[in-house]
Image (tube, helix red, strand yellow):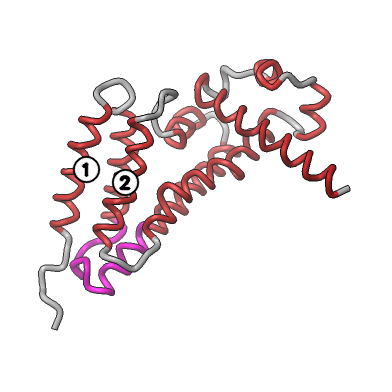
Amino acid sequence: MMQKNLKRMATMQRMQVTGLELFYKNGYYNTSIDDILKKLELSKGAFYYHYESKEDFFIQIIENLLVRKVYSMLIEPVEGHENTSDLIMQCYDNALETAVHNEMDFGFVLGNFISEFNGRNPKIMKHLNDIIRIWEVNLVSVIQRGKFEGHIDRHADAEGVALFIMSSFMGVRTLMVETAPSARKYRFMSQLRMFLKSIENKQPAL
């Protein structure tokens, strides 16, 4: 029984990883169940044994892969207690570096899907927006902690700072797709550094 469950989980994981690649590359609406089956070399019966529909399959991908991807790339790295600006710089530097070296780069996967589903599928949008909310809440609390620990100026607007960092990150990811990704990353990171310096606490600790 255990063996069977592990095998099933491994199959589902493989299906989801491949599904995410296809949806990322071609878009959700341009990818049919047949495309997925062909790529996975699976029968329709095998697909419907694991998932109720294409939508259900995509929601499982969001819940299992996208949440984990965003968590490990943008949330976990800023959880420490060191200097807040350094943590944020390191986190976004690494997140953009993966984009510089990614051959299959169509932009920030979460951003792409939000653009594709917006106004077309409220159910999937809710799942995508949940990830954005988790990312935002985390970033706001990192800034608040920085203020509390004396790294960030206590007058800084934590919500505003988080929104600015998120939107500029999503924007630069889109702009890095076609043109000179490493140069764009470098320019973005130096501006981010200047911005973070501007909200650092200038008062020496008493």
- Give how far across and how far down residue 150 sits, in percent: 22, 73
Cβ atoms at labels 2 and 1 below 8 Å apart: yes
- Give how far across and how far down residue 15 sits, in percent: 67, 31
Q: Residue furthest bottom?
A: 206
Q: Which quarter shows the C terminus?
A: bottom left
Q: Quadrant of residue 146?
A: bottom left
Give the residue drawn at x 33%, y 38%: 96
Q: Residue furthest left?
A: 203
Q: Which element is circle 2 on?
A: helix
Give the residue drawn at x 60%, y 39%: 123
What amino acid is found at the position of numbered circle 1 in the picture? Met
What amino acid is found at the position of numbered circle 2 in the picture? Tyr
Give the residue drawn at x 40%, y 49%: 74
Mark 2, residue position:
92
Magenta segment, which residues? 139-159
Q: Is residue 11 magenta?
A: no
Mark 1, residue position:
189
- Give how far across and how far down residue 36 sits, in percent: 66, 21
Determine whether, in the image, residue 41 is placed left or right of residue 180: right
Determine whether, in the image, residue 71 is placed left or right of residue 80: right
